Image (cartoon, coloured by chain):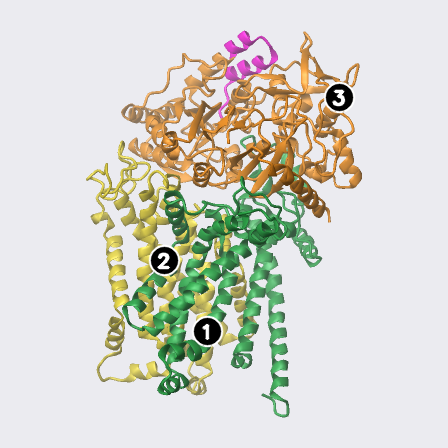
Chain colours: A orange, B yellow, C green
Amino acid sequence: MKISHVFKAALLVGAMSLAASAADAKSLVYCSEGSPENFTPSINTTGTSFDAARPVYNKLVEFAPGSTTAGPALAESYEVSPDGLTITFKLRKGVKFHSGVNGFTPTRDLNADDVIWSFGRMWKADHPYAKVSGGAYDYFNDMSMPDLLASIEKGGDDLTVIMKLNKPNAPIIANLAMDFATIHSAEYADYLMKKGTPEQFDQVPVGTGAFSFVTYQKDAVIRYKANADYFAGKPKIDDLIYAITPDATARYAKLKANECQVMIAPNPADLEAMGKEADINLMSQAGLNIGYMAMNAQKPPFDKVEVRKAIAMAIDRGAILKEVYQGAGQQAKNPIPPTMWSYDDSTVDIEYNPEKAKEMLKAAGVENLQTDLWWMPVQRPYNPNAKRMAEMVQGDLAKVGITATLVSYEWGEYRKRMQAGEHQMGFLGWTGDNGDPDNFLAVLLGCDKDGKPAAQNIPKWCNTAFQAAIVKATEITDQGERTKLYQEAQKIVAAETPWLNIAHSTVFEPVRKSVSGYKISPFGSHEFQNVDVAE
Amino acid sequence: MQSSVTTTDRVAPPTPWRAFWNTFAENRGAVIGLAVVVLISLVALFAPVLAPYDPLEQIKGATRLPPFWSDGADPRFLLGTDAVGRDMLSRLMYGARISLFIGLSVMAVSMVVGVALGLAAAWFGGLLDVIIIRIMDLIMAIPSLVLAILIIAIIGPSLTNTIVAVTIVYLPRYVRLVRASALSELSKDYVTAAKVAGVGPWRLMTNTVLPNCLAPLIVQGALGVSDAILEAAGLGFLGLGAQPPTPEWGAMLADTRDLMMSHPWVMALPGLCILITVMAINLMGDGLRDALDPRLRKS
Amino acid sequence: MASGETPARSFKISMIYFLFKRLALTVPTFIALMFITFVMIRLVPGDPVEARRGERGISPERHAELLKDMGLDQPVWKQFLDYSSDILQGDFGTSIVSKTPILHEFITLFPATLELTFFAMLFATLIGIPAGVFAAARRGGIYDQSLMGVALAGYSMPLFWWGLILILVMSNTLGLTPVSGRVDLIKYFYPPVTGFALIDSLLSNQKGAFMDAVHHLILPSIVLGTVPLAVIARMTRSSMLEVLEEDYVRTARAKGLSAWRVIGVHALRNALIPVVTSIGLQVGTLLAGAVLTETIFSWPGVGKWLVESIGRRDYPALQGGIMLIAACVMVVNLIVDLLYGFINPRIRHAK
């Protein structure tokens, strides 16, 4: 049975690491919130799965910890041709893949074949691994890579990769720093293929990263150990452990008991107590996100700007920020967060004025409006408690004579129905992937050539002037010009109010004081290669 | 069971009702249970008069206030307020309405459907009997909460659907009880005699068989109310029961789970209400059982 | 009993007949269960492809392609036929989410549930039976009343609330027990050889690992054991009271044997027959019913897995999981029936 191989391998590796950890090894436990689907980022879409794969892998370019700037990683340098159509990557020399995981011993260092193999799996249908584990490469497709890529080839030597594009694309380097562009070992893939167990490729990962995979027990724990041959130097901790703890209260209790040292997503209500704990360092950073309440512009009376504005005016976001975010966020006036370049600070935010809202509704001929209000069933970084938020908005709307019925579905169903535009009003949000404004404005408010809203355009709002600005901005590379275009786009959004900007939440991560070198990622990812822990 | 038939025929005092009450009143726990149930029912019935606030009204600036015995309590809110500034006392009072409504509805529906199916299975026998009993076995083979969650997943979460799901889960108990009592009754001589005498099936069922199943059925019904309240609260806790802003106790508890560490009372109070209500009904049910049917005492 | 046969022989025959009859009844139930779970799961809105997406959404073409890969584009009747024939071959399918065979997932998770159930029942029995006996012996007294009051409270307990309160008091305030999980991850690490944390921790030879596993078991066992404890205590008491009324007990008393000796030697043995049966039936309920307890304590067992599978629309996991759990419950109930038939021969001739 195939599974028993994995099991045996895990046991073997487990036993080996056990021997090593006996001599006082430094361990760091991270309380994560869920089980990964597998360990190959290109076939995943959730942050939980990306976090689980990241210790093992590297990309050509990577975001420096805690920043949104992409810099060299496996590629020690890269060069973009003046026409923007050719990118030449120079790979780092002597990068070693993990040895001894799943019985695999690499015979060579990283080279251009691995890069070509990794992109080929997502791109070419005839790639030997294209269909393994379901073969869904959603991020690759969503970033329009199939349209964009002309070729990826070996350059003059084994360590040069030349990527050719069909058209210039301003955000491409940032896109390649995203998790889907992880570089795998072509040799490991061949090894498993020969063994007849290719699906293990996605379950027992072998990469070049700071940690190598040890074992994974579903819904319980993932273990990694330090990679002594890591190209940026051996990490300071010896064992990295992900303790899978879905409940935020339980995570906090574990952190307090020093059962873990870093935790994801605290309850906003517990933040105050955490700040007072002597052993806990409550780290925070403005998140690269937006939480909003969409009003479906294709359903009357929300097709009228005045109605949307009046509703926006009726909602007390100050109270929401206080009660739902517990103050851990910033009231939003633009769809992109203020830490992102091109943010338009001149936008005047909508005031809270229920009296005026009532008048405006009356003037627009809206009386006794019955609407639905959708709330998402899960906690997200941009919206810690949509149910509570919905109850507050419901109360606010009642004061201006609008009756809102609360609606929710299972998370997958919820997004599907919202994307289909079944809602009248509803909550959703977004966390950025790569720090480019295009990743917010085009994805969340864009429409296609025929004026049909993009799937993620939840307000189902299309505006030709806005569309023209954001399309033009991707085709030029000069950041000054792009900034102007994106600011113009933000002004249009402010005037039209397709949705009510609620908040850019602050991301909090409580960390034990014994931990040093940890940085919060603006993309909500978790990285441990530079982290140290004092005994 | 025959004895109760003969008691109804007897004219001399004490009347059956009186006799029942005497036995019931002997059990101190049962009387306390009854008193608490009556009290909760009154609160539920008169919640609009008794509650100091509208249970849905959000009072700005008065969120997460502690109850009166804690520091920092506000005298306006006896039991404090919840995360969005609604009066806990008012919400708990209205919550009693919802919980009792769920419990009684589930009991009523399963009683009617259970009696119908149980009698049909017992009377017609054969294939119908086999089918009904197999279906009931099936329902019982699936873990009750998993089955309820599956049903809710299909028909969507709401107060009505909670009642539907919980009713389906608890139906087998009623069906099996009625069928078993009816079968034992139908095999008795007086029923055979009545059949021979040409008494129609409908009359036979309503006049002889059913009254004899009544005692265990009433006991099952009383305990069924408390079980239904617990099951519905469990569903509410998983977010699959009544939807916000309905003040359902299970949902109130689940909604404030994030406040467990920082504001424990917001979570503790609805749970306490569930416990007290269910316990009172169970106490009363025990008393009913002892008074109505001494043979059932075993379980 | 048929004439001409020895009692022992007739007993054997009737036992075998009883066993076969019960087994024969189980088969159609199982097939119907297969059908019903299949239909119900298809009726749940949403599909596994959608359930796995982030905010990013999916194109309709890609969606159709993925459904096809999972075999979900086939007509439903064909899916059912494929599914049934697979099950008959012992193949419960592969989880859509984790890509591992359902049977393997189940076998990995089931020991956790079994371990928890075992300790919950141990807790319930060790406290429930003595409490019931004691209450019966002091019938009507203050101990009887308060013990039965506590038992009734346990029986009426909303488990999710009870679990949270215990965590709040025992773990957070007093720091006596761990909050959740099965093992202290930073101190101990041992491979899951048997899947039972207690056994694995002993096998691992790590100092303190066993006690750590015991520590993690305490709170969940108490929470899961609360209802059975109440049921067992109440049952023991009433069964004991009944036996104490029997002639032979009266005789024993009349002979001048001490009250506790009468209770301990003569009454208890007979009183325990229905209690043992009820314990058996409770085990079946617990194996299946640990959903809330496992959720609250992040206990990696079968109940939690099933509920999460509904959320993820993991059809094969749900189907296979429900079938396997139902099969376990049926087997446990069958064993209980057989045992009961063995202890109490009257039942064999009923019906």
Q: Is residue B174 left or right of residue C16?
A: left
Q: Are marks 3 and 2 in contact (CB under 8 Å)?
A: no
Chain to which the residue tagged by mark 2 belongs = B
Residue A465 counted in the magenta span = yes
Quadrant where the N terminus of chain B sits is bottom left
Q: Mark 1 points at which residue?
A: C272
Mark 1–mark 3 Cα distance, whole angstroms, equals 74 Å
Question: Which segment did they paint magenta?
Answer: A461-485
The chain identifier of the residue carrying mark 1 reads: C
Residue A67 screen position, x and y as percent: 53, 19
Identify the mark at residue A324; answer none if there is no mark.
none
Q: Mark 2 points at which residue?
A: B103
Residue C171 in the magenta stretch? The answer is no
Overall secondary structure of the magenta stretch? helix
Chain designation of label 3: A
Q: In this view, does A468 lie to the left or right of A349?
A: right
At horizontal 24% and vertical 71% (from top left) the residue drawn is B25
